[in-house]
């Protein structure tokens, strides 16, 4: 086995695959597929800002058009959280990730759903059948869906019934939810109804793991599990052994990777980048220290589940940023190197231009 990879070298490999060392000419759909979706529970800005940091010349209409033409959708996938994915990935990924949703429903709502036996196979099927009829007749918010389900399940809480439907069915959020410059409630219908196609009847977990490594590797089995929410990934990696290389980090942990995936080395320069709130870069490994120093983790990921927009300097998170109308404020954790300031200004100006803040300003606050 080769020499261990340092945290810095792992970070450079990740940044290369995320197109954060150099912006890409890929179109929005191709980038969304390469990243296996964009974390999107906050609507609508984070996915758009995530593509802005990765694609040269990206304009918000490129992603909005995908949503409005049903070539992309917003749906609960990895870890049970909302992701923006292409229609093709929606139909493949949702059945693969069903165990994640089943486990979450049992752990979070079983006591509030006494009408259902969630320990039985298809325990939520009665709710799913009725919910499918309702949301395919008219897209519904969970606030409307729950009370409509309640008469058939009188001992269960309406809000919990809506969550049972969310977990049992592939529910997509329909536009204008998630469309740039517009607003709308999170109204749902089924993926099959919205896209006019059935779910993939035989999706392959091997292919999902290989795609994860292409976008996020090198990685441990635990990293893959953290990203997906699935368990028992070790046997999958063993099955793929002849298609992978085995590496190790400085702690001796086994890392898996694609043989020809970029691993540019620790010395490759990394430009300043402003990462979107909830950016995939920070949410796809059990050990995030390759790009997020552990001492800063609690300052980026808040106790109420918010992941702030962050500033990458020399390949690692060095602060947070926030946009308030025409003012973009960068708050570094330590004084930034003088050489990084032009990059911070340039990236901030890029975000301001993207959101149409023609008279916007970038301010670097004192280190916190």
Image (tube, helix red, strand yellow):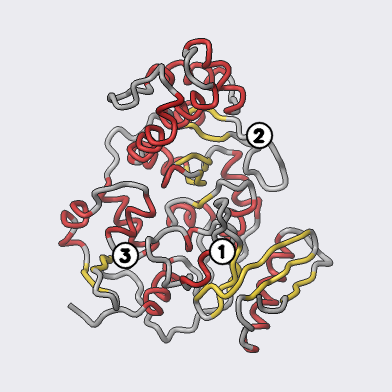
Cα distance in 3D space between marks 3 and 1? 22 Å
Classify 175 as above or below 18: above
Q: CA distance from mark 3 to mark 2?
A: 37 Å
Q: Which residue is mark 1?
A: 300
| Residue located 79% across and 71% down the image | 361
Tell me the SS state at disc 1: helix
Q: Give the residue number, with chain letter if any, for mark 3.
A: 219
In the rendered structure, which disc, 3 or 1, sits on the residue that comes first in sequence?
3
Q: Is residue 209 above or below residue 82?
A: below
Residue 4, position as x, y percentages in the image = 26, 80
Count residues near mark 2 (Cα–Cα under 10 Å), then give few for <14, some for 14-19, many for 20+.
some
Q: Secondary structure at mark 2?
A: loop
Give the residue furthest to the right.
359
Which residue in the structure is indicated by mark 2? 185
Q: Nearer the viewer, residue 200 or 225?
A: 225
Q: Quadrant of the N terminus?
A: bottom left
The correct choice, above or below, for 17 with respect to 318 in the image is: above
The residue shown at (55%, 56%) is: 278
Q: Residue furthest bottom?
A: 338
């Amino acid at each position: 086995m080769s020499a261990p990879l340092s945290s810095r070298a792992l970070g450079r490999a990740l940044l290369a695959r995320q197109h954060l060392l150099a912006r890409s000419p890929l179109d929005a759909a191709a980038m969304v597929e390469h990243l296996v979706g964009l974390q999107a529970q906050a609507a609508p800005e984070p996915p758009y800002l995530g593509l802005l940091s990765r694609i040269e010349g990206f304009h918000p209409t490129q992603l909005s058009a995908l949503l409005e033409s049903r070539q992309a959708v917003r749906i609960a996938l990895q870890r049970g959280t909302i992701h923006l994915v292409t229609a093709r990935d929606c139909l493949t990924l949702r059945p693969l990730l069903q165990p994640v949703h089943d486990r979450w429903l049992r752990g979070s709502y079983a006591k509030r759903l006494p009408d259902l036996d969630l320990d039985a196979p298809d325990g939520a099927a009665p709710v799913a059948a009725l919910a499918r009829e309702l949301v395919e007749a008219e897209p519904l918010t969970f606030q409307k869906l729950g009370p409509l389900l309640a008469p058939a399940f009188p001992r269960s809480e309406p809000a919990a019934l809506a969550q049972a439907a969310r977990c049992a069915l592939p529910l997509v959020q329909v536009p204008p939810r998630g469309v740039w410059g517009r607003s709308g409630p999170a109204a749902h219908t089924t993926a099959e109804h919205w896209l006019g196609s059935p779910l993939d009847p035989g999706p392959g977990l091997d292919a999902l793991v290989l795609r994860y490594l292409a976008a996020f590797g090198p990685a441990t089995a635990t990293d893959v599990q953290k990203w997906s929410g699935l368990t028992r990934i070790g046997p999958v990696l063993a099955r793929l052994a002849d298609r992978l290389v085995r590496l190790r980090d400085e702690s001796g942990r086994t890392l898996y990777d694609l043989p020809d995936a970029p691993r540019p080395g620790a010395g490759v320069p990394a430009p300043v980048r402003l990462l979107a709130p909830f950016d995939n870069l920070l949410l796809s490994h059990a050990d995030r220290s390759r790009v997020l120093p552990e001492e800063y983790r609690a300052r980026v990921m808040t106790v109420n589940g918010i992941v702030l927009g962050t500033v990458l300097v020399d390949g690692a998170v060095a602060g947070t940023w926030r946009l308030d109308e025409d003012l973009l404020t960068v708050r570094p954790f330590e004084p930034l190197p003088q050489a990084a300031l032009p990059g911070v200004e340039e990236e901030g100006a890029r975000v301001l231009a993207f959101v149409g803040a023609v008279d916007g300003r970038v301010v670097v606050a004192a280190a916190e």
